[in-house]
Image: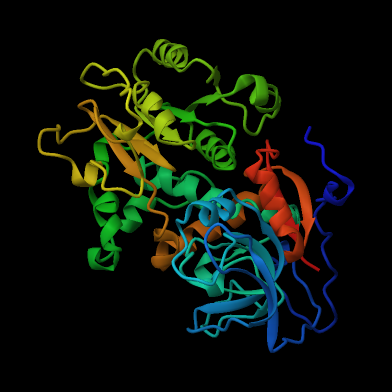
Amino acid sequence: MVSWPARWKRRSVTSTLPQSNPAGVAVDQVHYEFQQSHQDIDLPDEQSALLLHAIRQPYELVNRHPLPSAQSDDELLVKVKAAGLNPIDWKSPDFGFGVPTLPFVSGRELVGTVVRAPASNNSRIRKGDVVIIPSTDYRDLRKAAFQEYAVASYFNTIRLPHSTSPESGSILGVAFVSAVLALGICMGLSFENILEGPDLLKIVRSIDPERLPADIREECLKGISEAERAREGDFLIIWGGSSTCAHTMKQIARLAGLKIISVVDSGKHGLRLSSNSSIRPDLLVDSHDPERAISVIRTATGNTARFGFDTTGKETAAHLLRSLASSAPHPALPSDPSEYSSTKSKLPTPPSTPSEQSSCHSSHLVGLTGLPKTDIPEGIALHNVPIKLFHEIPEIGEALSEWCERLLSKGSLVPPDVVGVVDGLGEINQGLDRLRKREISGGRLVAVFP
């Protein structure tokens, strides 16, 4: 249990009860499964926002910032109710990455009320809907969460069911998108048998390749062959299994019939993960001794595990690499830290596989934040999550958003835990300081807006 001062006290995240349908308002039964607000909101000319003016400085609260506006018929405007605080929100200003322009508005995910519906003929999203918005398009500051109003594309908008609170919804979106794209694109897992989910690989390979962003085109089209796709009964190793992304991935992978091995600090997270039926893995492995963890995994799987997902970094991804089945002996880990690299660098991934590597890969490692640079065994492919598919390709964004609605409505997907709240934009800096100090574990902080 995480403790915090009075101002950080845990706030109830019990979902809002269904509102009665006011007289004269016709709402179809399917739409009425989701939360709505019938409050009239007068839009101001300006808003409050949290701005980053320089690297390695705190965000500054500005009270007279322009209101963002829709630039296409597919876009809508929401009044932010809650914003999830993510590690990237403090790492970007501290280390100077993921900041395309200054001043910069951060915040990757939110829940808000639609105050202007999209102008296009789209019946799924309406004015008054309470929605989850994963803001994966961080270059578009109109879509950032750390402001009173934000813009979103309708195909990136997830209606919030009555069973999920705004606070819980505000920390689910990015984890959901990352987990589903890693499973569905990088590992080729189909979700067609899970509440009519999508086959993302089939969708992405059926559209015009020129529509795919150039830097992820090869990953989408050639990252994994049809014969190598993940299927029911396959092992999935998640190194860093206590993260919010792992929390979501384990639930979806279990629904698809994968056998899950979760590598975590068992002293810190073992009891929580083992006691929660939603995220309990088939095998929990302690990460304290990586060599021992690798040995346990290879023995337990009979050296047949073909799929791995690392949420922590390049060093742990190298450990995970040695846990997977390959057609060549696993080399020892490099002693020089420079032999590891960030996922932002030019990696020898399957889309750009060096000629000396085999063209037929049997195992697949997906790195969320980093991947090893050298000594990649023959028969193992490295992947980065093609996150921009969600906001750049409407067919993918809409498929994920609609499926997330069904999973939440049916109780098949449980959001991560809200471990504390901060009050509005003014306390986000304090919340991010707690993340810097590693005081938050087992869930996320949420900024709740008035």
Please name whichever residue, 441 or 350, is drawn nearer the observer in this view of the structure.
441
Give left or right: position of 343 versus 271: left
Q: Residue furthest bottom?
A: 45
Query: Which residue sits at x=23%, y=67%?
Result: 210
Give left or right: position of 319 versus 47: left
Residue 415 showing in the rendered view: no
Residue 446 at what x, y percent from top left?
72, 54
Above or below for 123 versus 377: below
Coloration mode: rainbow
Q: Which residue lies furthest to the left in this view?
A: 355
Please name whichever residue, 426 or 290, is drawn nearer the observer in this view of the structure.
426
The quadrant of the image that shows the C terminus is: bottom right
Residue 404 showing in the rendered view: yes
- Marker count (numbered): 0
Query: Which residue sits at x=70%, y=45%?
Result: 434
Which quarter of the figure has residue 367? top left
Residue 129 at what x, y percent from top left?
69, 71
Query: Which residue sits at x=62%, y=27%?
Result: 280
Above or below for 364 versus 222: above
The quadrant of the image that shows the N terminus is: top right
Above or below for 26 versus 317: below
Please name whichever residue, 368 or 301, is drawn nearer the observer in this view of the structure.
368
Residue 64 at what x, y percent from top left?
69, 83
Residue 69 at what x, y percent from top left?
57, 84
Query: Which residue sits at x=86%, y=47%?
Result: 9
Give left or right: position of 331 versus 8: left
Please name whichever residue, 277 or 327, is drawn nearer the observer in this view of the structure.
327
